[in-house]
Each structure stands twice: as structure tokens, then as C-alpha cells.
Amino acid sequence: MFSRRQSPEQQTDIEALKDQGLVDEIKQRFPQLVFRRFALHEVRSFFVELNGAEFGKWFLHERADHIILYTTYGSLFPALRFVKTVEGAFKCSGFCFDVRFGA
């Protein structure tokens, strides 16, 4: 099955990530994510810091209007998405358990 979050394996992996508290751990370790705006270089610095924080290996997907920091977990690609604001800064718009990239 190719549908996002539909297969039994994906559902099991999502539940495992929830049980492990990944989202809460990231929020506790980096409380500024929710409240502040980031310059481009600050998002890149956060990416380096996230990779050093024992949350696994993270990857960076950068476009003009957004930046996605993602990792792998079983059948999933958990991610943090940063969207560009009108002012040109980036704001974390949230966490996704299984991000997919379009062509």
C-alpha cells in the first residue's frame, strides 16, 4: 500500500514514535522552536544541533519558501517543517510523522 500512514507497518511505526515521545523530547530540548522566527543561517545551525542531539541522523530539504528537516524511522520519514514568512524569516510550522516530497 502506497498511501501515507495507511499501512499496518506505518501505523505501528507512528505508535512506536509516539510511545518514545520523540515530539515531546524535541520540544523540551529546543523550546524556542514554537515561539521564534529563524534566519536561514539559524535554521541551518539548528539542523547541525539537531544532528548532535541523539535524535538520529537528520537531513535537510531546502526550497525558497520552506525548509524541511527530516529523519527516517522504519517505514516513516518524521520531519520538522519551517515556512518562510513575509518578513523573510522562517517559522517552524510543526512536526509531521511521515513527510513525502513531491516531484
Image (spheres, rainbow, N blue to C red):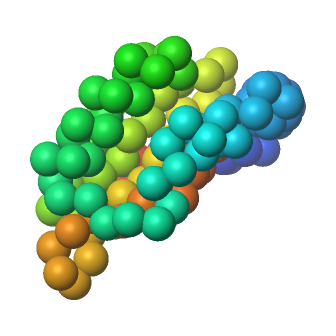
Asked whether residue 77 appears in the rendered view, the answer is yes
> Is 59 drawn above or below residue 79 in the view shown?
above
Q: Is residue 11 left or right of residue 43?
A: right
32 over 78 or under it: above or below: below
Quarter holding the N terminus is top right
Apparent side of residue 16 relative to residue 74 in the rendered image (left or right)? right
Displayed quadrant of residue 11: top right
Q: Is residue 2 visible?
A: no
Depth check: give the residue in front, 53 or 6: 53
Circle count: 0
Extreme-bottom residue of the structure: 86
Q: Quadrant of residue 84?
A: bottom left
Q: Nearer the viewer, residue 81 or 29?
A: 29
Q: Position of residue 101 (x, y in %)?
A: 40, 47
Question: Which residue is at a point 38% across and 65% down the rendered structure image?
Answer: 36
Residue at the (38%, 22%) spot, across then down: 51
Q: Residue at x 14, y 47 (%)?
A: 41
Residue drawn 51% across the image and 61% down it: 34
Q: Position of residue 32 (x, y in %)?
A: 45, 54
Relative to 35, 20 lies left or right: right
User: Residue 91: where, in percent of width, then height?
Assistant: 36, 65
Q: Residue 64, how many percent across, how many down? A: 15, 62
| Residue 1 sits above or below residue 33 on the image | above
Q: Is residue 45 left or right of residue 70?
A: left
